[in-house]
Amino acid sequence: MSLPQAPTENTMSHVIIPAAVEPSGPQFQRFPNELLLEIIKYSVALSPDSKLGNVVDKKYFYFLNSLGPFFKLRKVSKLFASLATRAFYEVNYFKFVSINAKPGQKALDTTIPMLLPPIHVRGYLRRIHLAICLADFFTTTNRGDEVPQAQRWCAQHRITTIQDLFAHCYGARHLRALSDHTLASGRLSEVNLHILTDFRFLDAANFKATMALFTEALFVVTAGKVQITVTNEWGLSEAWHTELVKTIGVKEQ
């Protein structure tokens, strides 16, 4: 058995030592982004046992956005920030509200703009609850500090055109955004739509015209599962609500 020979000056001249050695082995391989995304989802998913609940509403979002895993992961790197944001919106259930009415209050009087996520992340939404108000009228008024109390007036006008519907009804605009996928993508797995009605012209002729107008608006909700609930200001369903639901198309996919 021959012993290994020590290198000589002649053999050493042929030994090439690289200036840098690239690390190798499983411990140095990067996780594919899709696998990393699934891992992050476990970190940012809300627990059903959470004291604050597992539905992200306006108040809860402010808390999650400044504390906890969602906040911390976004500070790691740009890649983690991007993946954490996508995971957060894909895995959780979000509630968006444009009404602030208490039982007995007319919905249109308390309608507020809906607080939605930035446009560039809305495509990540998968499960949403929307609470909107639909009305058949709008008001005009001359109220103002410069107008004497005795001279102030307020008038109600029935909505008779598509232009009036989208100009004066927040809920109709939100429903249109849901229909054309600008409120969320067409990849929604679950939509729970709660409509609070504030209709003032319910005589047969006007109601028929209003339903024709809503049908003309071509509202449609597309998701894997769609649930539509319609109530009045007392949280009760009325007989004519079924006619309103018929004006909204549903595509479950």
Image (cartoon, rainbow, N blue to C red):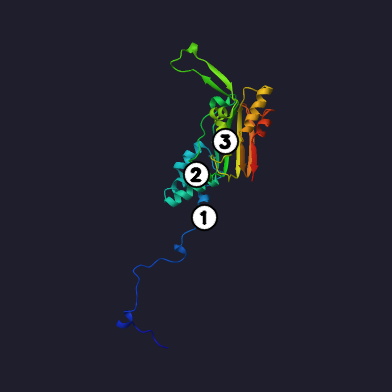
In the rendering, which numbered label is found on residue 176? 3
The residue that mark 1 highlights is 34
Give the quadrant of residue 50. Answer: top right
In the rendering, which numbered label is found on residue 76? none
Q: Which amino acid does label 1 sit on?
A: Glu
Q: In this view, does 213 lie to the left or right of 152?
A: right
Q: Which of 236 and 124 is in front in this view?
A: 124
Residue drawn at x 46%, y 42% as measured from the top left: 65
> Counting other residues with Cα less than 10 Å from the Cα at mark 2, is it few (<14), some (14-19), or many (20 or more)?
some
82 is higher (above) or lower (below) than 5: above
Q: Which of 50 and 242 is in front in this view?
A: 242
Marks 1 and 2, the one that precedes in the sequence: 1
In the rendering, which numbered label is found on residue 121? 2
Front label number (1 vs 2): 2
Find residue 201 and report its horizontal and vertical position in percent. Answer: 63, 22
Find residue 214 and report its horizontal and vertical position in percent. Answer: 62, 31
Find residue 58 and report its horizontal and vertical position in percent. Answer: 50, 36
Q: What residue type is labelled 2?
A: Val
